Amino acid sequence: MDITVVGSGPNGLAAAVICARAGLSVQVIEAQPTPGGGARTLGDPEFAGVSHDICSAVHPLALASPFFAEFDLPARGVTLAVPDVSYGNPLPGRAAAIGYRDIGRTCAELDDGASWRRLLGPLSADCDGVVGLLLGDKRSIPPSIPAALRVAPRLLAQGTPAWGTLAGEDARALFTGVAAHTISRMPSLVASGAGLMLATLAHAVGWPIPVGGSQAIPDALLADLQAHGGKLVLGEEVTTPPSGVVLYDTAPTALLRLYGDKLPSRYAATLRRYRYGPGVAKVDFVLSGEIPWQDPRLAQAPTLHLGGDRTMMARAEQEIAEGRHPEWPMVLAALPHLADPGRIDAHGRRPLWSYAHVPHGSKVDMAETITGIFERFAPGFRDLVVGVRSVPAAHLADHNANLVGGDIGVGGNNMVSALTGPALRWNPWSTPIPKAYLCSSAAPPGGGVHGMAGFYAARTVLRREFGIKDMPSLSP
């Protein structure tokens, strides 16, 4: 076997596909009984016709990342349903803020739509340039200098106390809810970068939902891998380093356990100092009907940011960073059936995906807190709940070892890690361990179902280990 990939998340599978298409023999080893990592979908244990997305549910980068743009999921039979509403943000005591796929409609409903258009209009018009810049390897000339010149001042403004340049309480909340996907203090540059990219995608390509669940994405990657001779091993935990070249779609600290005293001392010390960020508490609900929103426009929003206004969200993120549970945490939620009606079972039951931001390693069950937040904006929500599947942050690693303490960013949601990975190296996908490479979300460009960490790691491996300088085609 030329290459072993440890972990079958989207990044690991992206790396495996590239290496297999380059003519190498590849095996993927996954500890869990099902593949997909952060893009898995599993059936509800009680209601057979309902399925839940275990980590990620909404996938704007499945259309727009350079890797997936070339891999072309739609051409492989993956239907990415793009709703008219990208996301909605309920607000206390006033109408919700709605991010439509149509930027004009979004601006028309905001208090200061001109401010929103100034921020995102030029970026959504150059989506490929923006995504190429923010998901680039950060070690070469930006693929689009004009995009860099548009992004830089906006990144600085929204990532510093100058973020007040975006006018209107509703617009500020709308952007902050998107930026909060990073689970970091705000304002910050890393939150600003994520907010700009995701909000740009909301208008340029939408926020699509894979029909049938997120599992459709890793399934398409696996089909291509196996068509090119690759192998998948499930239910096998790697306890000793595999032979040959290995790409780790794992948390970087897993290397401490695998290599022990064989690690170079300085690198081992760096990994011991590696810090994971705040976590999420996951709560999957089963509902018997539609949510009775006070603002009826939210009934068309498959993705929801329920953190209140900008001040409330920033305060909550500060509190969890300091190890406290806020009274009103940042909550993200998704109703995939609004874009994919097939997610409703024969009895009208449908899944509600949600998580709340919590301190690292929290053992608190957040189901009641999330229920209470829904009740603020949709009185009667509680009466629709027929099932609750709650996983505190401390237990997320039980079904995905990368999510240490519930940190879905694998420690990479900060500006330093986004640039350097877990250790200061010119090539952050390499390690000082011979033939060992890192391709998880802990390596640049960070979290998200985009496949780019796997792409860059595979590019490094092909060049360094096999002398292959030309990347293989990813087209179907």
Image (tube, helix red, strand yellow):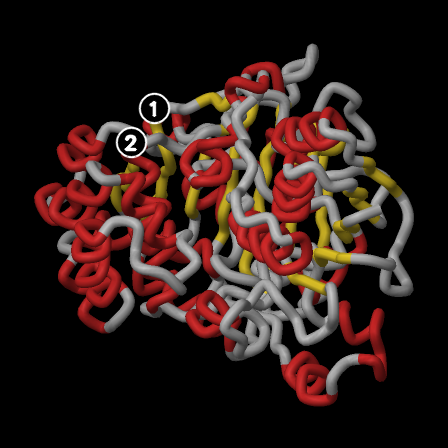
* SS at badge 2: strand
Mark 1 crowd level (few <14, some 14–19, many ≥20, 10 Å Cα): some
Q: Residue at x 61, y 72 (%)?
A: 276
In this rendering, the answer to whether 385 lies above or below 14 is above
Based on the displayed image, in which of its 4 quarters is residue 60 positioned?
Answer: top left
Judge whether residue 329 can be spotted in this image.
no
The answer to whether residue 138 of the structure is visible from this angle is yes
Identify residue type, mark 2.
Tyr
Q: Quadrant of residue 159?
A: bottom left
- Labelled pair 1, 2 in contact (Cβ < 8 Å): yes
Residue 26 located left or right of residue 221: right
For image coordinates 69% across by 87% down, the residue present is 269
Which secondary structure, mark 1?
A: loop
Residue 346 or residue 121, whichever sits in front: 121
Residue with the mark numbered 2: 100
Which residue occupies the extreme left position in the image?
A: 114
* Residue occupied by mark 1: 84
- Please identify the quarter of the rendering in which residue 313 is found: bottom left
Residue found at x 54% / y 60%: 357
Image spot of residue 63 (x, y percent)? 44, 32
